[in-house]
């Protein structure tokens, strides 16, 4: 369980009805900004089937600024590489993106900027699972 930047609880492994994307970012990372734009495209296309969660490696002030600059309205929590590595596997670069299936299992992980079309392929494959 994580606590989002506004004090709410986030349970990424418990979202059994939706595909979940966890995007790890740093507020100074220009590729993270590009990744956020790609995530917005997916949210528009899959709003009913997709949950996006941000995981910031920045300070609270840096995270809030990044969220404002990038119009982020999905939940974001602040964490460390070590905690993410324990829960999801290594974070060797930012952005890092984890895709969880509807059972809360890690379906795929990407350690760099990844175009929305690649993530969309994962989402469609997960949605096709019974």
Image (cartoon, grey):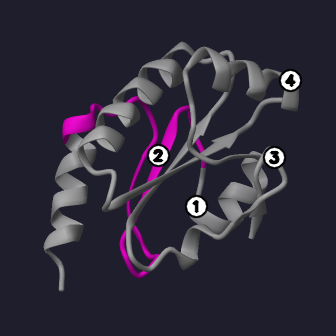
What residue is shown with label 3? 6
- Say which label, 3 or 1, has the lower sequence index: 3
Q: Callout 1: few (<14), some (14-19), or many (20+) C-alpha neighbours within 10 Å?
A: some
Identify the residue at horizontal 67%, vertical 27% (top origin): 26
Q: Position of residue 71 (x, y in %)?
A: 55, 24
What residue is shown with label 4? 61
Given this view, does label 3 or label 2 mark the residue nearer the observer?
3
In front of the other: 123 or 87? 123
Residue 107 is covered by the magenta coloring: yes
**Quadrant where the image shows the C terminus:** bottom left
Identify the residue at horizontal 40%, vertical 24% (top origin): 37
Q: Residue 108, relative to residue 34: is it above or below?
A: below
Q: Which mark is residue 89?
A: 1
Given this view, does label 3 or label 4 mark the residue nearer the observer?
3
Q: Which residues are magenta?
A: 91-117
Q: Residue 34, relative to residue 109: is it above or below?
A: above
Given this view, does label 2 or label 1 mark the residue nearer the observer?
2
Mark 3 and mark 1: span between their CA atoms? 25 Å
Mark 2 secondary-structure assignment: strand
| Quadrant in the rendering for residue 38 | top left
- Say which label, 4 or 1, has the lower sequence index: 4
- Say which label, 3 or 4, has the lower sequence index: 3
Q: Callout 4: few (<14), some (14-19), or many (20+) C-alpha neighbours within 10 Å?
A: few
- Say which label, 4 or 2, has the lower sequence index: 4
Residue at far bottom of view: 130
What residue is shown with label 2? 97
The answer to whether 89 appears left or right of 36 in the picture is right
The answer to whether 17 appears left or right of 117 in the picture is right
**Quadrant where the image shows the N terminus:** bottom right
């Amino acid at each position: 369980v994580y606590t989002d930047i506004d004090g709410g609880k986030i349970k990424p492994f418990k979202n059994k009805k939706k595909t979940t994307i966890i995007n790890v970012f740093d507020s100074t990372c220009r590729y993270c900004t590009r990744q956020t734009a790609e995530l917005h495209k997916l949210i528009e296309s899959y709003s009913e089937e997709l949950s996006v969660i941000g995981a910031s490696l920045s300070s609270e002030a840096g995270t809030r600024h990044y969220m404002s600059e990038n119009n982020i309205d999905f939940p974001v929590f602040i964490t460390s590489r070590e905690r993410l590595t324990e829960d999801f596997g290594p974070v060797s670069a930012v952005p890092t993106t984890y895709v969880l299936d509807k059972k809360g299992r890690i379906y795929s992980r990407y350690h760099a900027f990844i175009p929305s079309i690649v993530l969309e392929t994962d989402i469609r494959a997960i949605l096709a699972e019974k």
